Amino acid sequence: MFVSSLQDCALPLLREVIPTDKVEVGFKDLDAAILVGSMPRKEGVERKDLLKANVAIFKTQGEALEKYAKKTVKVLVVGNPANTNCLIASKSAPSIPKENFSCLTRLDHNRARSQVAMRVGVPSDCVKNVIIWGNHSSTQYPDVHHAIVNNHGKEMSAFDAVNDESWLKGDFITTVQQRGAAVIKARKLSSAMSAAKAICDHMRDIWFGTPDGEWVSMGIYSTGNSYGVPNDLMYSFPVMIKNKTWKVVDGLAINDFSRGKMDGTAAELVDERDTALTFLGA
């Protein structure tokens, strides 16, 4: 089904599709790997059991990357819990730089841009430099303190353009945090087109870079960051990308409201990591 769908798109850059269940075929000499398969959360499944199942999946995929892929491979993890799955994959491929691994928070980033744009009444490309901090979960922190809106030809801060601080610190955040759950409730399936678009956005920016003066959100390895986020996590930061290399945007002012939200999502990731690592060596 997936092969025929790809063929039927008549994509100009698509040369060949090789369906396989053999890791030595699927992972051989990869330049890019997009890991979308994971065990989803189902009713009645304990969180630790979900983490245990996904550790097994992403340990196997990480080991396959280690054995067969190019050491320059760029790895994007989409399957949830994406941040922790990405960390497990990276730890299972020790000869591939940690900087080559990232997880998808671009969908959340795009949702945040869209919400602000709709509120102001401008196209989404008139909103730039929103930030998703932390986990791709309901604890993520969509932050617009540094966002800029082109409001019908005049650039201004998102707070000035929206002119509703209570919405930006309330319903805006919860809408973005819970958007995925709202989609599942509405269509009984998770996001499809918007997730695929976010994957394309993420990979395109890795290959071609971000526009001057603009950043995007990516879940990346946290060790050495300047924002007080604990080391050894895959945590979403604002990044600029050039020559296929990301760099965290440093020096952004963080107020007490943001600090609390950033710390809260980091705590969840620490807990996920610590639980997952107990299964990694099992």
Image (cartoon, rainbow, N blue to C red):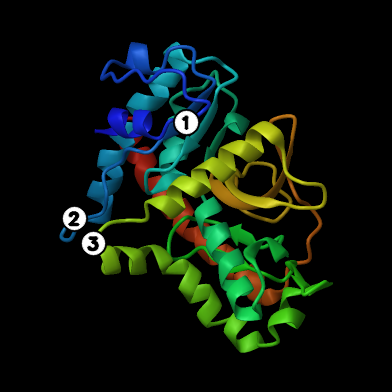
The quadrant of the rendering that contains the N terminus is top left
* Residue at image mark 2: 45
**Image position of 199 (left or right of 122):** left
Residue position marked by numbered label 3 in the rendering:
188
Q: Position of residue 206 (x, y in %)?
A: 64, 35
- 257 or 205, which lies in front? 205
Q: Secondary structure at mark 3?
A: loop
Distance of mark 3 from mark 2, alpha carbons? 18 Å
Could you tell me which quadrant the C terminus lies in?
top left
Q: Secondary structure at mark 2?
A: loop
Distance CA(mark 2)–CA(mark 1): 39 Å
Pointer 1 residue: 11
Residue 27 horizontal/vertical position (percent): 41, 17
Crowdedness of circle 1 by 10 Å Cα count: few (<14), some, many (20+)?
A: few
How far across and how far down the image is residue 264, in percent?
A: 52, 66
Is disc 1 in contact with disc 3, using a CB cutoff of under 8 Å?
Answer: no
Res. 230 visible in picture: no
